[in-house]
């Protein structure tokens, strides 16, 4: 019995981690790819939060596939994931670039910083992204999965570690400016996030288990 539980948990952790990697990489790739047409519709001010909201929705959808639960909470999970990531990551980017400009006296862009500055900035951005995403998801499922009380912390740590880790690894394969380097950044960031949040995801799945028939 115990071995069966361990096997099921190991299977969930692997599924969750892989889908987090695919979901974050695919979501950000699609969101960034839609930046130009989105900007034409909503304007320059809103293009970042809207494209990141698209990315967050795709990421939340991948997580929900890993959870494998009923659609009753699926829509709220996916929707709040988009909202949380869009708001959180946008706020993080704005704060980092504003701080960079205040320190240097020149316009600062996160992608244009040197390696150490970019890693520090991505840690900050990742923490805000995790805070926004985690808080939004927790609010969506607080009644269904009360066991996930530390979910926000796991998301903050996962994103805060994942984005700089992806950037660091990408430096060895051409940097963020190269297609291979950028793909590596997205993949490593998503997989790192998946590893850090897998236990929380398992707790959410366990909390939803009694509602399997919804």
Image (tube, grey):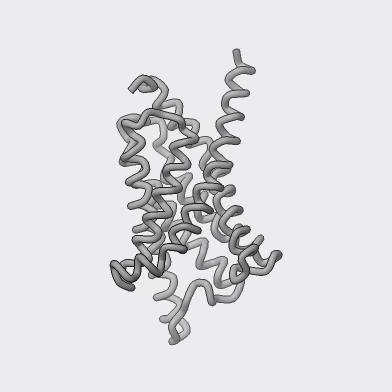
Instruction: Residue 155: give x, y in percent of width and height.
Output: 46, 47
Q: Where is residue 23 in the image (x, y as percent from the top left)?
A: 50, 47
Image quarter where the C terminus lies is: top left
48, 204: nearer the viewer: 48
Task: Kindly give the residue lying farthest to the top in the view shown.
Answer: 1
Q: Is residue 205 left or right of residue 138?
A: right
Marker count (numbered): 0
Tell me the residue at 57%/41% (across/down).
Answer: 17
Q: In the current view of this chain or complex, which residue is farthest to the bottom? A: 105
Please tell me which residue is depicted at 59% across the width and 53% down the height of the picture. Answer: 187
Q: Can you give x and y, in whole percent of width and height, for residue 101 in the image? A: 43, 81
Q: Which of 36 and 165 is in front in this view?
A: 36
Q: Which residue is drawn at 54% across and 58% down?
A: 163
Vertical relation: 175 (above or below) 31:
below
Q: Which residue lies furthest to the right in this view?
A: 172
Identify the residue shown where x is 32% and y is 35%: 142
Asked which quadrant contains residue 183, the reply is bottom right
Residue 169 image offset from top left, x and y in percent: 66, 60
Q: Quadrant of the N terminus?
A: top right
């Amino acid at each position: 019995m115990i071995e069966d539980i361990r096997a099921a948990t190991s299977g969930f952790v692997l599924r969750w981690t892989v889908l987090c990697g695919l979901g974050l990489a695919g979501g950000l790739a699609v969101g960034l790819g839609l930046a130009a047409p989105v900007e034409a519709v909503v304007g320059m001010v809103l293009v970042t939060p809207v494209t990141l909201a698209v990315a967050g929705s795709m990421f939340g959808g991948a997580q929900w596939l890993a959870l494998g639960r009923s659609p009753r909470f699926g829509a709220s999970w996916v929707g709040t994931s988009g909202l949380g990531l869009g708001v959180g990551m946008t706020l993080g980017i704005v704060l980092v670039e504003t701080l960079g400009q205040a320190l240097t006296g020149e316009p600062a862009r996160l992608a244009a910083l040197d390696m150490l500055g970019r890693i520090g900035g991505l840690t900050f951005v990742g923490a805000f992204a995790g805070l926004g995403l985690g808080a939004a998801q927790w609010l969506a499922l607080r009644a269904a999965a009360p066991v996930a009380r530390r979910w926000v912390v796991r998301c903050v740590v996962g994103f805060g570690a994942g984005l700089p880790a992806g950037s660091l690894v990408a430096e060895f394969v051409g940097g963020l400016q190269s297609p291979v380097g950028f793909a590596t950044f997205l993949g490593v960031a998503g997989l790192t996030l998946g590893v850090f949040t897998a236990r929380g995801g398992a707790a959410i799945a366990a909390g939803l288990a009694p509602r399997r028939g919804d």
